[in-house]
Amino acid sequence: MDLTLPIEAPFSLQSVLRSHGWVQLAPFSAETPYEAFTYTDQLAHGARVTFWTVQSVEEGVHVAVKGEVNTLEEAEIRAKLTRMLDLERDLAPFYTIAEQEPKLSYMAERARGRILRSATLFEDIVKTIMTTNTAWSGTIRMVQALVDLYGRSLAEDPTRHAFPTPAELAAPDVETLRRQAKLGYRAPYVSELARRVDSGELDLHALETSDLPTPLLRKQLLAIKGVGAYAAANLLMLIGRTDYIPIDSYALKVVSDEFHDGRPVKPADVEAAFERFGEWKGMAFWFWDYDGEE
């Protein structure tokens, strides 16, 4: 089945896919220069696994779905793609601010600012936990293991698996997760998150759509085991709250090089560098032209 999501300019699928490393994590797949991507997804309606190929067309984004889908499934795919491509974010206020800063002035012209997300917040949280205290290659390996071991396979191609649902990740015990997927200390965090979401104890939809002030929403994210300050800020960015900066070793390095001539810096220095952008400081940090090549 083919469907099209009409999208108003400015929009660039390539810019969304380049926004961070999620496109390199299963069940995404893409080839540089990231002009299209594929995604394997388990639909909530019917619990069927589908495979999508997504690419830009003049009217917006074209999605080729393997096999036929019913009306409910089509609506679910549209809603998930809207989330994944960050289509509901209003970037006009940020573009106005960015025009005044040479290091951000390219944003509107190149349709930057939308951040690639997973189909669900659950997947985003698990993947964010997989980024902590490891090299990026470790994140890729652990996410691939979770998908291959616990995700349902596509009927037409058993080598392709969807990201596992909360129920599927709640089923194995902690030691099985640790041993099979080699998650290390992250195994109990993933297990508890999956159990809480599957049981209904933790309502991620309510959390994602909450109108709480960002500091209070951040406290709720920090209450999830395995989510520290960096992970909470990263998830806030994905939710659409850009008040906080996800500060890790990369953030310390780029801010040191950009603003402090390579001298060691602290998290407070990272915050100070972008404080003038207020509620948009996370966006300013994320898309800043650090190397002068944008």
Image: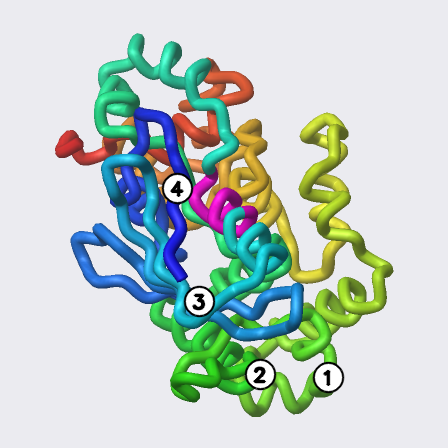
- Earlier in the chain: of badge 3 and badge 4, it is 3
Secondary structure beneath dot 3 equals: loop
Examine the rendered structure and indicate whether residue 287 appears above or below residue 137. above
For residue 176, side relative to residue 31 (left or right):
right
Q: Nearer the viewer, residue 171 or 244?
A: 171
Q: Amino acid at mark 3?
A: Thr
Examine the rendered structure and indicate whether residue 162 appears above or below residue 87. below
Graded by Cα atoms within 10 Å as few (under 14), some (14 to 19) or many (20 or more), the crowding at tag 3 reads few
- Earlier in the chain: of badge 2 and badge 1, it is 2
For the point 29% across and 21% down, the residue is: 108
Where does residue 58 sit, x and y in percent of width and height? 24, 36
Query: Can you see residue 22?
Result: yes
Mark 2 and mark 1 in contact? Answer it, CB < 8 Å.
yes
* Quadrant of the snapshot with the N terminus: bottom left
Q: Nearer the viewer, residue 103 or 22?
A: 22
The answer for how far apart the CA atoms under marks 4 and 2 are is: 35 Å
Q: Which residue is mark 2?
A: 150
- Earlier in the chain: of badge 4 and badge 2, it is 2
Query: Can you see residue 272?
Result: no
Q: Which mark is residue 62?
A: none
Q: Amino acid at mark 1?
A: Ala
Graded by Cα atoms within 10 Å as few (under 14), some (14 to 19) or many (20 or more), the crowding at tag 2 reads many
Please state which of the two labelled residues, at mark 3 or mark 4, is closer to the viewer: 3
The answer for how far apart the CA atoms under marks 4 and 1 are is: 38 Å
Mark 1 and mark 3 in contact? Answer it, CB < 8 Å.
no
Secondary structure beneath dot 2 equals: helix
Q: Which mark is residue 171?
A: 1
- Earlier in the chain: of badge 1 and badge 3, it is 3
Graded by Cα atoms within 10 Å as few (under 14), some (14 to 19) or many (20 or more), the crowding at tag 4 reads some
Q: Which mark is residue 252?
A: 4
Mark 4 and mark 1 in contact? Answer it, CB < 8 Å.
no
